[in-house]
Amino acid sequence: MESVTIAIITATGSILASIITVISVIVTANKNNAAVDAKLDKQQAVIETKIEELTREVREHNNFARRMPVVEEKIEVANHRIKDLEEEAKRRRDVG
């Protein structure tokens, strides 16, 4: 009878030790998960900030790209006007 009691006490001790080990593993895993989640949240915030900055830069570039054809056309008109003025000045020199 004494050996059965010792076996039961030993088994109970082993079960309690196993339960404590499992609880410790769960607590440690939860702490690690919280740390990983915090790190991911920080990285997500950095990524979102970078995306916002890139979006702003793309919008600036698109606005510039929309204005460029207008500028090119105005330069072409100005060059044509300069050419006309130079030709008129040459004609006046040749005549006068």
Image: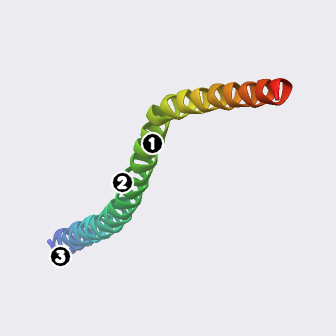
- Looking at this view, is 7 or 21 the one in front? 21
How many angstroms separate mark 1 from mark 3 (CA)? 83 Å
Q: Please identify, in this view, whether the residue under mark 1 or under mark 3 is nearer the observer.
A: 1
Q: Quadrant of residue 31?
A: bottom left
Q: In which quarter of the image is residue 25?
A: bottom left
How many angstroms separate mark 2 from mark 3 (CA)? 68 Å
Whether 65 is drawn above or below 8: the answer is above
Q: Earlier in the sequence, mark 2 or mark 3?
A: 3
Q: Residues within 10 Å of mark 2 (few under 14, many from 20)?
A: few
- Looking at this view, is 52 or 26 the one in front? 52
Extreme-right residue of the structure: 94
Q: Please identify, in this view, whether the residue under mark 1 or under mark 2 is nearer the observer.
A: 1
Disc 2 element: helix
Q: How crowded is mark 3: few (under 14 residues within 10 Å), some or many (20 or more)?
A: few
Q: What residue is shown with label 1?
A: 58
Question: Is residue 76 rendered to the left or right of residue 22?
Answer: right
- Report the residue at 44% width, 37% height from top: 62
Q: What residue is shown with label 2?
A: 48
Q: Earlier in the sequence, mark 1 or mark 2?
A: 2
Q: Which amino acid does label 3 sit on?
A: Glu
Location of the N terminus by quadrant is bottom left
Extreme-front residue of the structure: 96
- Report the residue at 27% width, 65% height from top: 30
Q: Residue 2 carries which label?
A: 3
Q: Which of marks 1 and 3 is nearer the N terminus?
A: 3
